[in-house]
Image: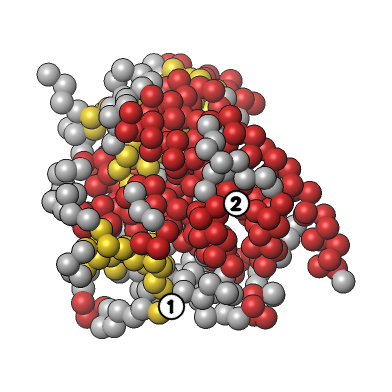
Amino acid sequence: MDSKKGIAILGSTGSIGTQALEVIAAYPDKFDLQVLTAHSNADLLIKQAIEFKPHAVVIGDETQYEKVKQALWEHDVITYCGQEALSQVVEFNEVHTVLTALVGYAGLKPTLAAIRAKKTIALANKETLVVAGELVTREARENGVNIYPVDSEHSAIFQCLVGEFHNKIEKIYLTASGGPFRGYTTEQLKTVTLAQALKHPNWDMGAKITIDSASMMNKGLEVIEAKWLFNLKTDQIDVIVHPQSIVHSLVQFEDGSMKAQMGLPDMKLPIQFALTYPDRYKTNFPRFNFMDYPQLTFEKADRSTFKNLDLAYRAMEMEGTAACILNAANEIAVEAFLKEKISFLDIASINEQTLNHCQCIQKPEYEDFVESDRLARLFAASLIPTMQDLSKN
Ligand code: NAD
Ligand code: MG
């Protein structure tokens, strides 16, 4: 009997994807890699496929399809291309768990397809829960599907809850490193550069989440992600800045007891736990040494300077498609910032204007999210030339 767990990794060429492959490579008798996908990095996808011999790969960018197919046919790896294929490969019988390590709104459709095919979800792609948390968690419940968090803070909360699922949560604290601009004033933020924003003090991550961390939007997205994963109300979720990134998050129970999960900042641990829960496998990851961290410090999050965090709380309270609208605006704004078309502070400004302008649809279904995402992207993009003009004055 084959007792190996069949894994599909959506976004295998990214930061989470490549670290997940390291985890999988360490336990060849436990995991059976079935599917790898990438958006445009054909060379790395080919290299990964030759090494791990999955059943199939998907390359998002159709112009690269022939290259990938030619490279992999003699290795017996089936090649697909395009966004639609992502939703098909997650349905393969041999796939048990789908690791959603792709970035942004593009994760929503294949995650829903995986849930409907009753696959376990190891969720890194937080945007899926931000955009359509009610729909995704409802479908997961109806299909008896578990969603295990990969995000370090949510993994921490989940690890604190093991053995406590029947006990009520009073509140949770998500820790935030504060990013490269912790302690900056609005005046100082006016002149920060792309290169500065891309230098995260504690974590080496993909470009989009690195910018989100600098702007605190990442913590905003994580607050919304936590709401859906742990079925919490807005006032049960707090953010605390913890620059050392050792305490990954905390749960406070109704008796006042608090549990924290700690460790060195290394995404391989939460990735592995999401793939092996309820078991823990022995690792050689570096261990925490107290003498390296004689002080762990905590401070209040500055929600008036880092407006994105407030916007996320606001979107959460608006319900409906508000968080979908905010996420879409942010994806456009971050893309523009990465191309140096706008300034750092423009990100939050585009997000705020889009959230104010776009119509929030209540009790949305899938099509409403698609439409809200589309309109919010259009509106956010329309703000960008204006911003450029303003910034010239
Ligand atoms: P990344 O940019 O390094 O990698 C993204 C992956 O997704 C790549 O394989 C890319 O080919 C693929 N991809 C990009 N756009 C796509 C599209 N439109 N369609 C299909 N595939 C696409 O990103 P990352 O840092 O690995 O982050 C992935 C997800 O995990 C994000 O949602 C992020 O918020 C979350 N996350 C990342 C970290 C981290 O340490 N990197 C930590 C917590 C959560
Ligand atoms: Mg996180």
Q: Position of residue 62 (x, y in %)?
A: 61, 25
CB of mark 2 near ligand 1 (< 8 Å): no
Amino acid type assigned to the residue bearing label 2 in the image: Leu
Q: Position of residue 226 (x, y in %)?
A: 38, 53
Residue farthest bottom in this picture: 294
Q: Position of residue 205 (x, y in %)?
A: 46, 55
> What is the number of the mark on residue 288?
none
Marks 2/1 in contact by CB < 8 Å: the verdict is: no
Q: In this view of the protein, which residue sits in the foreground, 4 or 324?
A: 324
Residue 16 at least partly seen: no
Label number found at residue 326: 2
In the displayed structure, would residue 270 be above or below residue 391?
above
Residue at figure coordinates x 17%, y 32% from the top left: 29
Q: Residue at x 39, y 27 (%)?
A: 114
* Residue drawn at 38 percent across, 31 percent down: 139
Along the viewing direction, whichever of 310 and 187 lies nearer the viewer: 310
Disc number at residue 300? 1
List the single residue furthest toward the front.
362
Instruction: Give 320 or 96, whichever is nearer the viewer.
Output: 320
Q: What SS does tag 1 mark?
A: strand
SS type, badge 2: helix
Q: Where is the N terminus found, in terms of image quarters?
A: top left
* Placement of the C terminus among the 4 image quadrants: bottom right
Residue 192, by quadrant, is bottom right
Quadrant of the image occupied by residue 105: top right
Mark closest to the chain's N terminus, 2 or 1: 1
